[in-house]
């Protein structure tokens, strides 16, 4: 089995699995006042410190959620609380951000969707022009979830903060956290979303960094108890959170080693267009070695995915089509690269457990499969 869909969900590491099992084998609610509750609270604190450390954030500025989607929703819906204000994002964001922007637009907010260029980059001048005196939020991702394009977060931050100190800057760092350096202080970000299952933690666990002083500007999107200081009520998923702490600590220790490892694998994959006629890489400039997006025009991505699936090789089909409009709604299409590129795009996403041999076997399968799948 060759698994190249790590941007969707990655294998849980042995240490993270053991940490989760240890919590599940014991009882204790962090909100309880007895010994078992205090023990659970200590475990929660240790995990928070580990995640905060990988963000270079104060421990108390990290709030646990159910994952990257909830963190994004909390940041966007929590910050844009009334009609008439303006919020800025891009056309290439994760669906959780895009959907939240559609929701705040329905509630009466003005929304601006920046247009990336053909390589997936957002021009800082375009960002500055989009901000007006009613702008309360800008939400832009760090590493693109489909193409791996790495954004100029520090440049975005300088523009946003120069336009108004009250504008909140949210970064979706789900695909970059634990794989690339993420420094919320250096970024001068107000909110940053991260997730566990992209870095060998357990699904259903994530976090939102909220800069001190910003919490009072956010409105919860759920109500109930006082957990996570009221911004995310409900008994914490302690088993998942403890595994997240372990996977974050592992990622921090192995960050450079893992970057070098996956870079060598991606170097091999980048030769796909040289070996398969018509294949083309999507995204340019600064791109994460953890993700490669490649189109095979004339071959539907879902058909190719299924053919690879039959060989126990797993990738992601890059296009999600709106059948009523017959136009793909994915990042490649948002880059303005056209329907043919968008509908034939697959995402190959790597992790520390992949090998160069995996890449060789994928390429061999693509060479064998693509001639017979291409539409004539």
Image (cartoon, rainbow, N blue to C red):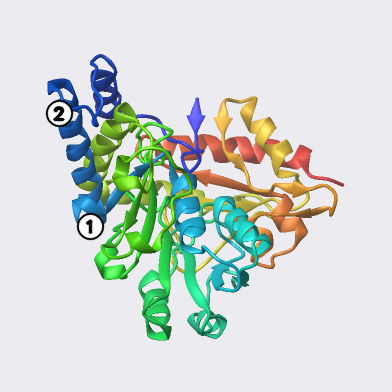
- Residue 105 appearing in the image: yes
Residue 240 sits in quarter: top left
Q: Is residue 219 left or right of residue 329?
A: left
Give the residue pinned by disc 1.
57
Relative horizontal placement of residue 368, taking residue 21 as reference (left or right) = right
Relative depth, front residue between 215 and 14:
215
Q: Is residue 66 above or below residue 91?
A: above
The answer to which of marks 2 and 1 sits earlier in the sequence is 2
* Crowding at mark 1 (Cα within 10 Å: few <14, some 14-19, many 20+): many
Q: CA–CA distance between discs 2 and 1?
A: 24 Å
Q: Please tell me whether residue 76 is drawn above or below residue 305 in the rendered image.
A: below
The secondary element bearing badge 1 is classed as: loop
Residue 207 pos. (x, y %): 35, 46
- SS for dot 2: helix
Q: Residues within 10 Å of mark 2 (few under 14, many from 20)?
A: some
Q: Which residue is mark 2?
A: 38
Q: Position of residue 214 (x, y in %)?
A: 33, 64
Residue 194 position, x and y percent, is 38, 49
Please give the name of the residue rendered at 61% of the width and 35% of the height, measured from the top-left corner. Answer: 365
Residue at x-position 29% and y-position 24%? 20
Nearer the observer, disc 2 or disc 1?
Answer: 2
Choose top left, top right, bottom left or bottom right for residue 234.
Answer: top left
Q: Which mark is residue 123?
A: none
The residue closer to the viewer here, 239 or 363, is: 239
Residue 313 image point, x, y percent: 56, 31
* Residue drawn at x 35%, y 73% as measured from the top left: 154
Is residue 148 shown to the viewer in this render?
Answer: no
Q: Is residue 343 above or below residue 13?
A: below
């Amino acid at each position: 089995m060759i698994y190249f869909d790590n941007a969707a969900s990655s294998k849980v590491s042995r240490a993270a699995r053991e940490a989760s099992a240890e919590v599940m084998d014991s009882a204790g609610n962090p909100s309880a006042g007895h010994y078992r509750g205090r023990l659970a609270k200590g475990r929660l604190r240790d995990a928070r410190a580990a995640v905060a450390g990988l963000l270079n954030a104060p421990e108390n500025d990290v709030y646990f959620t159910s994952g990257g989607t909830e963190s994004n929703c909390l940041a966007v819906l929590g910050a844009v609380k009334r009609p008439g204000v303006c919020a800025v994002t891009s056309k290439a964001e994760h669906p959780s951000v895009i959907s939240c922007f559609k929701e705040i637009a329905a509630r009466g907010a003005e929304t601006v969707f920046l247009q990336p260029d053909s390589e997936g980059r957002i021009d800082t001048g375009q960002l500055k022009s989009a901000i007006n005196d009613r702008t309360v939020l800008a939400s832009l991702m760090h590493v693109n979830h489909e193409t791996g394009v790495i954004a100029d977060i520090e440049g975005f931050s300088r523009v946003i903060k120069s336009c108004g100190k009250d504008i909140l800057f949210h970064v979706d760092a789900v695909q970059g956290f634990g794989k690339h350096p993420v420094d919320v202080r250096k970024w001068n970000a107000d909110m940053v979303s991260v997730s566990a299952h992209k870095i060998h933690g357990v699904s259903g666990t994530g976090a939102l960094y909220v800069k001190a002083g910003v919490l009072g500007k956010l409105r919860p999107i759920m109500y109930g108890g006082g957990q996570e200081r009221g911004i995310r009520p409900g008994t914490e998923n302690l088993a998942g959170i403890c595994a997240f702490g372990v996977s974050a600590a592992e990622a921090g220790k192995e960050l450079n080693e893992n970057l070098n490892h996956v870079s060598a694998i991606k170097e091999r994959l980048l030769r796909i267009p040289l070996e398969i006629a018509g294949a083309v890489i999507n995204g340019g400039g600064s791109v994460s070695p953890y993700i490669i997006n490649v189109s095979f025009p004339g071959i539907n991505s879902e058909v190719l995915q299924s053919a690879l699936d039959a060989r126990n090789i797993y990738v992601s089909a890059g296009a999600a089509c709106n059948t009523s409009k017959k136009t793909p709604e994915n990042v490649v299409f948002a880059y303005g690269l056209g329907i043919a590129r968008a509908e034939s795009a697959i995402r190959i996403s790597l992790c520390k457990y992949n090998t160069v041999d995996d890449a060789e076997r994928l390429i061999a399968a693509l060479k064998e499969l693509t001639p017979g799948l291409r539409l004539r």
